Amino acid sequence: MLTIIEVKAREDGGHGLQSQSHRKECWLEGWVAVPETLVAQVWACGGYCDLTLKKGVLTGITPRERPQPEEPESQDK
């Protein structure tokens, strides 16, 4: 199974994550393969992390805090 992560973070600071069992190399432009040693970490943080890239290869991540969901506005009047 190959996991890939989006290189550019979304507006909320998270990176998209995908896995496919039959892939052996990254299949999307703007994404990078996640080494097996980092797969559990990127899924544990849900893609909310800073990426360390060396020559286009993911070599490390630093987990970040996930944004808190916004509270719905009160309907009380």
Image: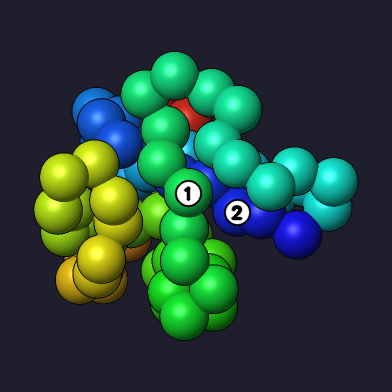
Residue 43 sits in quarter:
bottom right
* Amino acid type at mark 1: Ala
Q: Is residue 65 above or below residue 53?
A: below
Seen from the viewer's position, the closer of residues 52 and 68 is 52
* Residue tagged 2: 3
Q: Position of residue 53 (x, y in %)?
A: 18, 52
Q: Earlier in the sequence, mark 1 or mark 2?
A: 2
Q: Secondary structure at mark 2?
A: strand
Q: Position of residue 31 (x, y in %)?
A: 42, 33
* Amino acid type at mark 2: Thr
Q: For the residue carrying disc 1, how many other residues have a C-alpha within 10 Å: few (<14), some (14-19), or many (20+)? A: many
Seen from the viewer's position, the closer of residues 2 and 61 is 2
Q: Which mark is residue 49?
A: none
* Residue tagged 1: 33
Disc 1 + disc 2, Cβ < 8 Å:
yes
Name the colour scheme: rainbow
